[in-house]
Amino acid sequence: MTRTLFSLTAALVGSSSAFTQSPSFSNASFCNAPMTRTMQKNTLLPAGTDLTRRSFSSLSESSSSRSSSPRHSMLFAKEMSTYDIDTDENAEQSLADNPITNGANGQPSSPQTVNGDAGNVANRYSSVLESMDLNIPSLKELPSQRQISSNDVFCNRELRLDNIRAIGFDMDYTLAQYQQPNFDKLAFDGAKEKLVNSLGYPKEVLDFEYDHTYWVRGLIIDTARGNFLKIDRHKYVRMAYHGFSPISSNMRKQIYSKTFNKQPSFTEKGYVNMDTLFQHVDAHLFALLVEMKDFGEHEFLDERTYEEIYRQVRECVDLCHRDGVIKDEVARDPEKYLVLDDGLLPMLRQYRENGIKVFLLTNSYWEYTSTAMNYLYHEKKVDEETQKKNEWTELFDLVVVGACKPAYLKDPYLNLFRVEPEDGSLKNTDGLFEIEALGEGGAEKFLEMGKCFQGGNWNHLQAMLETTAGEEIIYVGDHLYADVLRSKRALGWRSCFIMPELPEEMRIFNSQVDLRKSIMQLRSLRDELGAYADTMRLEMTKASFSESRAMEKKIEQIEEDDGKIKEKLSEAHRQYHSAFHPRWGQMFVAGYQDSRFGYFVKNYACLYTSKATNLGLASAARAFRTSGELLPHDNMLSRPSTEFVDAEVE
Ligand SMILES: [Mg+2]
């Protein structure tokens, strides 16, 4: 019996004689993680290795052409992506995803997308309805095509809104969206000034220009080496830059590939995850300083490690958020920095009308929160008298500022202070003891004394919300670690992750769907050819001399074909990723796997969407559904051109 697993489509292989007999798939190994055939020599460079201008040229093919001047926009297109070195190096990997439909939430996105064409809808579902003996009259109400909008809310974990008792929102980059790069430049310019005038950095730092387009979320900053990394979900470094210069494949592997004794987890001291858009400022300033240290002639920088420079960048940027550099300027001209969204107030009111408690939980302090929220509430800059009234607080059951997330979500000893809205002054509270001492309805009585707070911890919040079940709270935020991962992992809260970058990612993905399909088909073909050649190699050991010679020739042909496909695949893969971002590629994908960022979004964000107000497009009765996930063996079997071989039966 011919043990054929795959019935190959004519489009893929034509009449290639190599496939008259396909390899057995019944005892195949399924692969989730990439495996390299050749282990690299293992010479992990020590953290803090100073890759100065004397040694740095060995790191990068293009470093010699760079200078420390801020002219990166011009160089942008010329830079070589490091995808070329990675493409398809891990040919053993089977395909494990199908993101064209991943994340779709099972519901039409909004009423205006419905355009009604009953005939086509019937065609889309007629086969399944017939086989299940179902008559569905409401089918004719659906649009002819499933509309996927960039305003949709996508679902990783089933969630019914009617089970939710409280919904909380972060403020910065969640309720308050900022105009980039205007807002970022406040911190960037403020930090430059502090570095030069307070810490003695070279005056040339003041000439640095900010360009947020260099950066994407989800990268990791190796502060000890001055490197920027994109890693996949298995912590394999797929791409690396030193400052703005690509690091060669060999060097990257020598620094970061796993060893038998030590594999970086990228959570160690010295690694910083870029989990929020705020960090684009840190990244750009640090990369410019890395270049200045490497290529400039500045004794001041020669005496400092990359790690020290990063720490000082972080301190200066952080100070800008606290000392008025940002706050005062936003208060002076909010139109320039904040984005108004007319869906905000109706959404918040809708939740409260449906009996869901609404809270604000932000790390920003009162003065800035009051400035930003007053602008969003009144949709204009307000005078001092109106500002003091803080009418926006009517949107919330309670407000917590200066929350110190993620500590707020794990440290039970942080004290709770009540804020006097008119002047921002603080009063002590006895927190849980006080609520308890107030007896029945203690939480309500406690909030009647004032519902704006600073600090505290999740125990206070849950007591004030009168819930002990994390599952009843959904928190909406833009910080992947502090807002999403921490709240879900530590407290079991449901989470909604806000990604302003999502519409652009979806737009590009949609334009590249055909190219992606071709890439996936070529990958599949390579995988299949490799498996077939492998079977033949095993059979050669039992074959006669003449049969063995014939097989050898076939294997040679397969290897030649594989080389041709690999070359084409490399170019297609580079083209695909470059469409998303010329340096970092697709945000959710690293190589052919989920990026660390994509993996975290999948695992920790119950829901994700481009902006908080998209939640207002869902009614309180909405059930969000996942689109289903398959492991490689089921994923491969679900493709139309495959055939299952039951090894037990054979
Ligand atoms: Mg935020």
Image: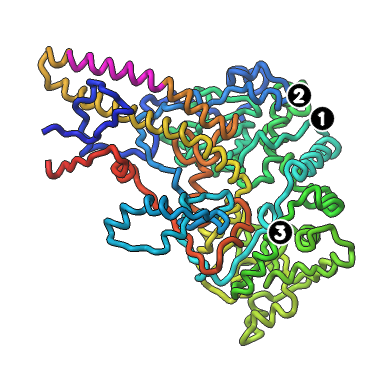
Neighbourhood count class around disc 2 (C-alpha, 10 Å): few under 14, some 14–19, many 20 upward: some
Residue 429 falls left or right of residue 123 = right
Q: From the image, tell me which residue sits under label 2.
A: 69
What is the spatial separation of the Cα atoms under label 2 and label 1, in whole angstroms? 9 Å
Along the line of sight, the residue nearer the viewer: 115 or 291: 115
Relative vertical location of residue 326 with respect to residue 416 in this rendering, above or below? above
Residue at the image position 31 percent from the left and 52 percent from the top: 127
Three-letter amino acid code of the residue under disc 2? Ser
Q: Where does residue 573 sit, x and y in percent of width and height?
A: 48, 28
Q: Earlier in the sequence, mark 2 or mark 3?
A: 2
Neighbourhood count class around disc 3 (C-alpha, 10 Å): few under 14, some 14–19, many 20 upward: few
The answer to whether residue 629 shows anywhere in this view is yes
Question: Is most of the magenta stretch helix, strand or loop?
Answer: helix
**Callout 3: helix, strand or loop?**
loop
Q: Which residues are magenta?
A: 550-566
The answer to whether residue 324 shows anywhere in this view is no
Name the front one of labels 2 and 3: 3
Report the residue that reaches farthest toward the right: 384
Q: Earlier in the sequence, mark 1 or mark 3?
A: 1
Quarter of the image for the N terminus: give it.
Answer: top left
- Rendered image quadrant of residue 507: top right
**Callout 1: helix, strand or loop?**
helix
What is the spatial separation of the Cα atoms under label 2 and label 3, in whole angstroms? 42 Å
Along the line of sight, the residue nearer the viewer: 66 or 103: 103
Three-letter amino acid code of the residue under disc 1? Asp
Q: Earlier in the sequence, mark 2 or mark 1?
A: 2
Residue 588 falls left or right of residue 320 = left
Quarter of the image for the C terminus: give it.
Answer: top left
Q: From the image, tell me which residue sits under label 1.
A: 207
Relative vertical location of residue 67 with respect to residue 456 in this rendering, above or below? above
Q: From the image, tell me which residue sits under label 3.
A: 342
In the image, is residue 270 part of the stretch drawn in magenta? no
